Amino acid sequence: MEANNNLKERDGFTGKWGFILACIGSAVGMGNIWRFPIMVSLWGGMDFLIPYFLCVLLIGSTGVIEEFALGRSTGAGPIGAFGTCTEVKSGKRKTGEMIGIIPILGSLSLAIGYTVVMGWIFKYTKMSFSGELIAMGQDMDVIGETFGITATDNFIWIIVAVVISFAIMSMGVSKGIEKANKIMMPILFFLFIGLAIYIATLPGAKDGYKYIFSLNASKLADPMLWIFAFGQAFFSLSVAGHGSVIYGSYLPKDEDLPKSAFNVAFFDTLAALLAAFVIIPAMAVGGAPLEEGGPGLMFVWLVNVLNGMAAGRVLGIIFFVCILFAGVSSIINLYEAPVATLQDNLGLGRVVSTAIILAIGCVVAILIQAITGEWMDFVSIYICPLGSFLAGTMFFWVAGKDFVDAAVNQGRKGNKPIGSYFFPLGKYLYVPLCIVALVAGAILGGIG
């Protein structure tokens, strides 16, 4: 196993929790907040949560560990990591390096779509503080028109999102990304918990909780339920062959990867549940239709609901600050893979690499505002599952068992190797399921 030559020059995380919080930040995104509660609602409370938890357990114990180990063992992002895998197999790096470009392009494409969404979030956070949101009251025509304008003509706030991302990322991994997540993630969880507690005290909230904890075991026989639960877990945990690989490459050799993967999966799931405990009871209190998913839920219906509550302005501020932190932590992860690619493969400095990638992201994001939904659908349906499949294939099928065992067991506390289940479960179940995610997403128009 040959380490990447640039490893000694690369930045890295200074501690276990800095890494974990950064990974949690990358995973806790819009999927947790505007899609997870809808899936819980549409598929029936515990009927959805049971298969979702099982899918999180599967992906967390295979795919998440695999991507961390792939990055850490090679000291590189997807291009260098895939190149190392093919070198182990055939002695040649070039094929793997060429394939590694695919998840990098996927990461950049997803980051561009998120940049547009972050423009919306920055604008709405500003409006919550200024009082513009509460001033709209519960006039759905005004609320809907405001979001319609925002979604198609919001270039100023896109630039703001890019500038703030640049300010964090240009400082590097330890001084920028790690420190930012150490601040944002604890605040996000604290605010979400407080919001959930307040919502629980409102009349009608109990109907939302009753629904969340309801169970109709007969629904568990529906294969479509399992497909959508897997899709939600798959995309929520951000296994796409880029972000987790590049974050793994910044890890020290003594980090226990299975434990880190468990913590990431646990806190990501906790964030999703907190979102459900806020949004579903809030919608029950406001009598809004939970079938309304995607951006319309957050920027139209939830604004309507929050504006009708006591202390609605304060609640709106708290909610959109939470969304802002979740979004910023996700977008810097998505941009990190292409930024690191310029550093590792072209030898450019951190600031220059960040400036180039974010300038590209900013320009393209402004140009695609009117087709953001279609852009994000294409990337999430096709590019992300393909990236995860390629990473899993390179690790489990191409590099082989000896490479896998060495990569995963390095840093294990007490020198206790990972269970014998890991390799066959990853190779024969997780990797094929990545193809299932790709095919099912293409047929059904997205599953996560």
Image (tube, helix red, strand yellow):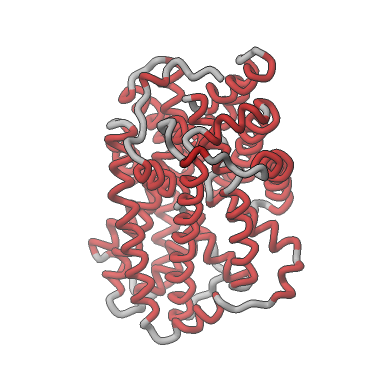
Out of 79 and 359, give the one closest to the viewer: 79
Which image quarter: residue 175?
Answer: top left
Q: Please say whether residue 290 is visible from this viewpoint.
A: yes
Up/down of 222 relative to 78, above or below: below
Out of 41 and 78, give the one closest to the viewer: 78
Q: Where is residue 133? Give x, y as percent.
A: 31, 66
Q: Residue at x 75, y 61 (%)?
A: 223
Up/down of 224 relative to 117, above or below: below
Q: Quadrant of the N terminus?
A: top right
Is 360 situated left or right of 38 in this image? left
Is 323 situated left or right of 231 in this image? left
Q: Residue at x 37, y 23 (%)?
A: 10
Q: Where is residue 43? Give x, y as percent.
A: 64, 69
Q: Please say whether residue 144 is visible from this viewpoint.
A: no
Is 362 situated left or right of 375 in this image? left
Which image quarter: residue 144?
Answer: bottom left
Up/down of 306 relative to 413, above or below: below
Out of 262 and 227, give the one closest to the viewer: 262
